[in-house]
Amino acid sequence: MRGEFPIAFDDSKRPKGVTKMAISKCPRGCDNAQFELVRQDHIKGANQPMCFVQCTSCNTVIGVTDFYDTAKLLEKIARKVGIPDLLDY
Ligand SMILES: [Zn+2]
């Protein structure tokens, strides 16, 4: 299943002085440098949806991450209990 995901990388929050990272390419050898998050709802042993990070060209899975944005969830909880600057860096 493809669609909107709560996890996103904000390049504007990169610390000052840190240059851009090297461009990652598909490890399978298709030379593609584009990846996407693809929701997986039925992974044996998982009690919640997960996201595969996969090549947009050949669909090789190169990583797995939580479907839910844990950092955003912690930020919401921190604000609710009165710690507004928890994730500012
Ligand atoms: Zn590929």
Image (cartoon, rainbow, N blue to C red):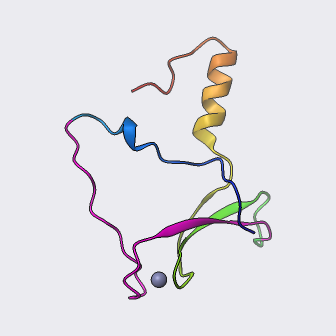
- Image point 75% across, 69% down: which residue? 1
84 relative position to 26: left or right: right
Residue 41 is covered by the magenta coloring: yes
On screen, 11 above or below 59?
above
Left/right of residue 68 with respect to residue 35 in the rendered view: right
Query: Where is 50 relative to 72, above or below?
Result: below
Query: From the viewer's perspective, is 61 left or right of 50?
Result: left
> Quick check: 85 above or below 5?
above
**Residue 49 found in image quarter:** bottom right
Whole-percent x, y for residue 39 in the image: 70, 64
In the displayed structure, 39 sits above or below 15; it is below
Q: Position of residue 63 (x, y in %)?
A: 53, 68
Q: Residue at x 51, y 82 (%)?
A: 57
Residue at 68 percent across and 48 percent down: it is: 68
| In the image, farthest residue toward the top | 82
Range of the magenta residues? Answer: 17-42
| Rendering quarter of residue 71 | top right
Residue 4: x and y in percent read 69, 54
Q: What secondary structure do most residues of the magenta stretch adopt?
A: loop
Q: Locate residue 59: give its quadrant.
A: bottom right
Residue 24 within the magenta-colored segment of the rendering: yes
Residue 7 horizontal/vertical position (percent) = 59, 49
